């Protein structure tokens, strides 16, 4: 792990705390999830569900995850063999990479990418092959030619993330079809991180790559209660996929954490069965906050690409005279009393993607309206 230091999120949250700045850096909500969920966890603790749950997860959560995959995505998943509960999506991704990637195997990653992917590949002794997403006027897209060129005989895995952190891109059916075709042609397993599956806006829908023809058998689909139910500290995640791949991941997972989150698991199981209105309201609420932040950032002088999903927006500060996002993020507390995260922190240092996104800053909008309004007001000081 040489070369890996404290994560950008730890660094920027510490900076926010030290300077008393508004923290639009690390992505965590500043209000709790549904009260029924919180009550259910308290009830589970009082009912004595405080010892190790089964290594695969509590049967009620396995069943709820399978039911959720069917209800929202039409995926048929066997709760007994095709679901694994994990300690957050982070463990699901890390255990998948450790299970399926041998030292020297290549893993394709679209950059910018969530920082845990490079770390998981390093832990496994794998070799990361980075493919930059292309920035367009409206968002970020998959460059099919660059992706095709990244495959080799050593390619073992492809790590996908949609809706995407940090860009907010929601991959289209056409983009996913290219990924699927290449994965099948090269007999590669896709690990797809879909933690923002319910945070998609403007009437768009999240499309899991596992739903594409021939993909269910070579895809591990990862999600987490942290994002959908605004309980990032509970660290209850899961993955679904074919039994042989899930078994391989379980083999690793049992020696990393064995199990976790006993009283949270039944609570999350019940929350996954909340009526459609809950999920629609979650997206509607975040869409409103997205618009509030995007408009405020524009008024403050940033150029903004309105994200189709996730709870992040990428802002370009060049119209304000700043061309280095890392430097700007270090100075933002003193300049405006706000904290963001440089997008280059999601890229291999010195790589092509890092150069492309060098000026950009990611802000999160998973905060109360009053916090977002105050933040954009403060950012007016940059003019
Ligand atoms: N996923 C969160 C983000 O992107 C941070 C999680 C973490 O701190 N590791 O902001």
Image (cartoon, rainbow, N blue to C red):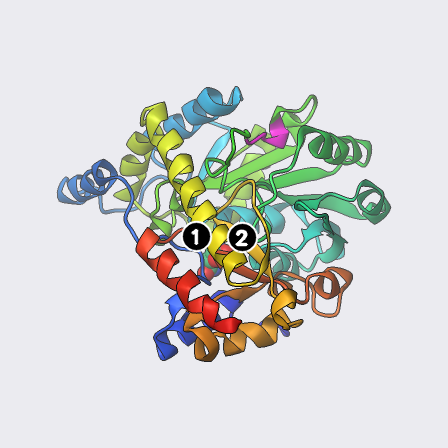
How many residues crowd around disc 1 within 10 Å: few (fewer than 14), some, or many (20 or more)?
Answer: many
- Write the residue at 59% across / 36% down: 220
Q: Is residue 47 rendered to the left or right of residue 140?
A: left
Is 27 placed above or below 214 here? below
Residue 101 or residue 358, whichever sits in front: 358
Say which quarter of the image contains residue 346: bottom right
x and y, in percent, of residue 303 in the image: 61, 57
Mark 2 and mark 1 residues within 8 Å of each other at the beta carbon: yes
Q: Which residues are magenta?
A: 206-210
> Height in image: 380 above or below 221?
below
Residue at the disc numbered 1:
365
Quick check: can you spot residue 164?
A: yes
- Residue visible at 79% across and 35% down in the picture: 182
Q: Dot 2: within a 10 Å radius of its alpha carbon, few (fewer than 14), some, or many (20 or more) residues?
A: many
Q: Which mark is residue 84?
A: none
Q: Report which residue position mark 2 lands on.
A: 313
Look at the numbered disc 1 and give the secondary structure of its residue. Answer: loop
Image quadrant occupied by the N terminus: bottom right
- Is residue 368 among what the camera can see? no
Residue found at x 57% / y 53%: 166
Mark toward the start of the polypeptide (2 vs 1): 2
The location of residue 355, given as percent across then percent down, is 74, 65
Q: CA distance from mark 2 to mark 1?
A: 8 Å
- Label count reads 2
């Amino acid at each position: 792990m040489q070369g890996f230091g404290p994560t950008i999120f730890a660094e920027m949250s510490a900076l926010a705390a030290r300077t008393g700045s508004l923290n639009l850096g690390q992505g965590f909500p500043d209000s709790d999830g549904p009260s029924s969920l919180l009550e259910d966890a308290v009830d589970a603790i009082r009912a004595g569900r405080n010892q190790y749950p089964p290594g695969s997860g509590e049967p009620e959560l396995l069943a709820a995850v399978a039911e959720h995959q069917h209800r929202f995505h039409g995926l048929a998943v066997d709760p007994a063999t095709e679901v694994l509960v994990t300690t957050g999506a982070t463990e699901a991704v890390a255990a998948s990479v450790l299970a399926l990637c041998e030292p020297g195997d290549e893993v394709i990653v679209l950059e910018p990418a969530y920082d845990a992917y490079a770390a998981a590949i390093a832990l496994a002794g794998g070799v990361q092959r980075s493919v930059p997403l292309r920035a367009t006027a409206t968002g970020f897209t998959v460059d099919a030619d660059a992706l095709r060129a990244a495959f080799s005989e050593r390619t073992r895995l492809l790590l996908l993330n949609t809706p995407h952190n940090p860009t907010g891109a929601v991959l289209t059916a056409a983009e996913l079809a290219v990924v699927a075709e290449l994965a099948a042609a090269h007999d590669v397993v896709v690990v797809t991180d879909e933690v923002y599956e319910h945070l998609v806006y403007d009437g768009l829908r999240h499309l899991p790559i596992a739903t594409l023809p021939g993909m269910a058998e070579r895809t591990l689909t990862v999600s987490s209660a942290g994002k959908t139910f605004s309980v990032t500290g509970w660290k209850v995640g899961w993955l679904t996929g074919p039994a042989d791949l899930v078994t391989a991941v379980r083999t690793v997972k049992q020696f990393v954490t064995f199990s976790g989150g006993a009283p949270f698991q039944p609570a999350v199981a019940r929350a996954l069965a909340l009526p459609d209105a809950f999920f629609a309201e979650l997206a509607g609420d975040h869409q409103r906050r997205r618009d509030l932040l995007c408009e405020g950032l524009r008024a403050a002088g940033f150029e903004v690409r309105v994200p189709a999903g996730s709870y992040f927006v990428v802002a370009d500060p060049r119209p304000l005279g700043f061309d280095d996002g890392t430097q700007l993020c270090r100075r933002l507390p003193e300049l405006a009393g706000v904290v963001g995260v440089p997008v280059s922190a999601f890229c291999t240092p010195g790589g092509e993607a890092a150069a492309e996104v060098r000026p950009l800053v990611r802000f999160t909008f998973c905060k109360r309206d009053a916090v977002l309004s105050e933040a954009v007001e403060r950012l007016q000081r940059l003019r």
